[in-house]
Image (cartoon, helix red, strand yellow):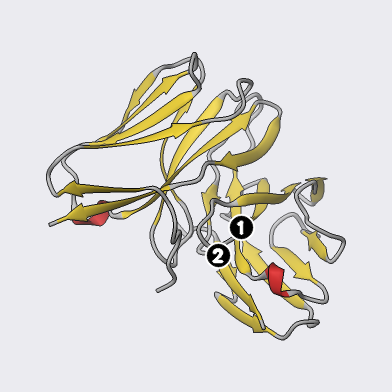
Amino acid sequence: GESVGLHLPTLSVQEGDNSIINCAYSNSASDYFIWYKQESGKGPQFIIDIRSNMDKRQGQRVTVLLNKTVKHLSLQIAATQPGDSAVYFCAENMEGNEKLTFGTGTRLTIIP
Amino acid sequence: GAGVSQSPRYKVAKRGQDVALRCDPISGHVSLFWYQQALGQGPEFLTYFQNEAQLDKSGLPSDRFFAERPEGSVSTLKIQRTQQEDSAVYLCASSLLRTGFTDTQYFGPGTRLTVL
């Protein structure tokens, strides 16, 4: 299948361990943030989102942390599984402007 | 339910040809977006529709790119006189539109365009 991201930052994690993927966003006026997962040959898949009035949000096996002071976003995946292997993108959005601005992406590889 | 669908999934064009890429958004979604994703990079915004109105086309790279959504549902992205630098994956996304609320954008699988 098509390879998404040949020269992306990479992270390799042992199956069952926790992983943390970091993202620095660019616009201090952004107020909505999303993490997407993209597998080879597929479109981005929504994982979790957070609004600027929160600093933490949890989903199933995933947690997003937002630090507005340093414009930093992180995605924590607990008990990683082989199916978590993909490229992960953070995206930001500014209120009143519908478009998303995506970060560079991180390739996560789960080692069996 | 059905997600966003795009066709064709793959398109090979000779330089100078015109191409048309189709997007079927999730039923009931008011907003529709087109993004371009070059190899190794994140998606980049091209244009945005709210129903049939094209509210933002600031990301279209040249006047060879044209998008329409005449009935507020299906959208077509047309690229005229394709160039090699147009080779990329073209992604479509749709979302609900709730007042005072930025809604989640759901993406289709993309169309991979290769210009020879």
**Amino acid type at mark 2:** Gly
Residue A85's label in the rendered image is none
Pick the front one: A71 or A79: A71
Q: Residue at x 44, y 71 (%)?
A: A2
Pick the front one: A82 or B20: A82
Q: Taking A22 as reference, is B44 left or right?
A: right
Judge whether B61 appears above or below B6 on screen.
Answer: above
Q: Taking B23 as reference, is A35 left or right?
A: left
Quadrant where the C terminus of chain A sits is bottom left
Q: Residue at x 12, y 44 (%)?
A: A16
The answer to whether mark 1 and mark 2 are in CB contact below 8 A is yes
Write down the quadrant of residue B116 in the picture: bottom right
**Amino acid type at mark 1:** Cys
Where is mark 2, residue-wise? B110
Pick the front one: B78 or B116: B116
Q: Position of residue B106 (x, y in %)?
A: 52, 49
**Mark 1, secondary structure of its residue:** strand
Q: Position of residue B69 (x, y in %)?
A: 77, 58
Are dots 1 and 2 on a single chain? yes
Pick the front one: B88 or A48: B88
Q: Where is residue B61 in the image (x, y as percent from the top left)?
A: 78, 56
